[in-house]
Image (spheres, rainbow, N blue to C red):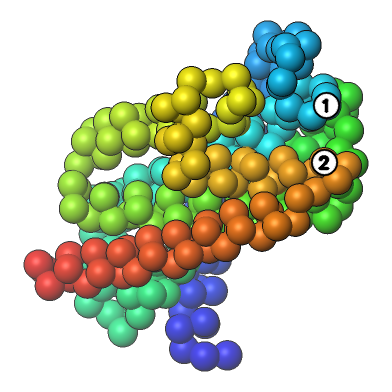
């Protein structure tokens, strides 16, 4: 096993052990999406009666991919909080002056978030099925949705860590996260079909990574997936994740030079 790969695995395992020892955040991350499914699923279930909404699927089927992606978005956004916690305790500084690769430090955080979101997404899909959702795309569609969620975690997690190393204050990071993420969610098709939205919202949605992930996952779970759309959106997400990871590496190196 290469040095970077072994170091990345060590960092991932260390962070996963921390997650297991303090499962409250993980439990909240599972309960919150369940509440979204229950509340939004019941609140907007008649919206599918509107002319032009979706492709005739029940609203719970429409909503579930949006909830999974929103969960991934939230999970990735708090990666910066983990970095700030390590920064406050001096853990990050000790790693940065050690032979550990900067890429391995970043990969450890991102892999931990990716593994966590996979487990959470599987449970949310199971809950949706128990509530009556039916996904014609089957296991293949579920895997595509998981891939879209993972790419979202990688992109948002990388940016969150970069912001954390620049801001270095948890309160400021929280304010930035809340200011950016919530509008982006509602400027996507996570909860509402964009054909019913205003023209300027549809324009923004075309450039919204959240919408890319939601559309890819939703189409993959449909009876007749649009593989061209799915492939295009996944490619865009992969490119975005790679660019964000590069930004994170540069942020870690910049912070290290400031020590």
Left or right of 1? Residue 227 is right
**Viewer-proximal residue, 211 or 249?**
211
Give the residue at the far bottom of this rendering: 2
Mark 2, Cα crowd under 10 Å, few <14 / some 14-19 / many 20+, is some
Give the residue at the far left of this rendering: 258
Residue 167 appearing in the image: yes
Q: Quadrant of the N terminus?
A: bottom right
Tags 1 and 2 in contact by the CB under 8 Å rule?
Answer: yes
**Viewer-proximal residue, 45 or 95?**
45
Residue drawn where x is 52% and y is 59% of the image:
236
Mark 1, Cα crowd under 10 Å, few <14 / some 14-19 / many 20+, is some
Left or right of 59? Residue 16 is left
Mark identifier at residue 57: 1
Q: Position of residue 22 (x, y in %)?
A: 52, 43
Residue drawn where x is 63% and y is 32% of the image:
67
Q: Can you identify the residue that label 2 sits on?
A: 222
Q: Position of residue 185 (x, y in %)?
A: 49, 31
Q: Position of residue 109 (x, y in %)?
A: 45, 60
Location of residue 95 by image quarter: bottom left
Residue 199 in the image: above or below residue 167: above
């Amino acid at each position: 096993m290469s040095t970077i790969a072994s170091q990345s695995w060590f960092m991932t395992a260390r962070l996963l052990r921390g997650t297991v020892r303090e499962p409250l955040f993980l439990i909240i991350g599972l309960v919150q999406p369940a509440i979204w499914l229950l509340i939004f699923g019941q609140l907007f279930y008649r919206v599918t009666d509107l002319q032009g909404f979706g492709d005739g699927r029940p609203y719970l089927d429409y909503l579930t991919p949006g909830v999974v992606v929103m969960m991934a978005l939230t999970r990735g956004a708090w990666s910066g909080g983990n970095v700030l916690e390590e920064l406050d305790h001096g853990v990050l500084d000790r790693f940065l002056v050690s032979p550990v690769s900067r890429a391995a430090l970043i990969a450890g955080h991102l892999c931990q978030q990716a593994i966590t979101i996979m487990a959470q997404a599987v449970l949310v899909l199971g809950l949706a099925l128990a509530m009556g959702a039916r996904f014609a795309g089957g296991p293949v569609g579920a895997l595509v949705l998981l891939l879209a969620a993972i790419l979202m975690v990688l992109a948002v997690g990388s940016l969150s860590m970069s912001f954390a190393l620049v801001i270095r204050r948890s309160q400021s990071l929280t304010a930035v996260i809340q200011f950016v993420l919530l509008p982006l969610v509602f400027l996507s098709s996570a909860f509402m079909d964009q054909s019913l939205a205003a023209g300027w919202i549809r324009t923004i949605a075309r450039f919204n990574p959240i919408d890319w992930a939601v559309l890819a996952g939703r189409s993959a779970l449909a009876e007749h997936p649009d593989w061209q759309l799915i492939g295009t959106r996944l490619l865009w997400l992969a490119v975005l994740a790679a660019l964000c990871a590069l930004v994170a590496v540069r942020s870690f190196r910049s912070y290290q030079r400031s020590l």
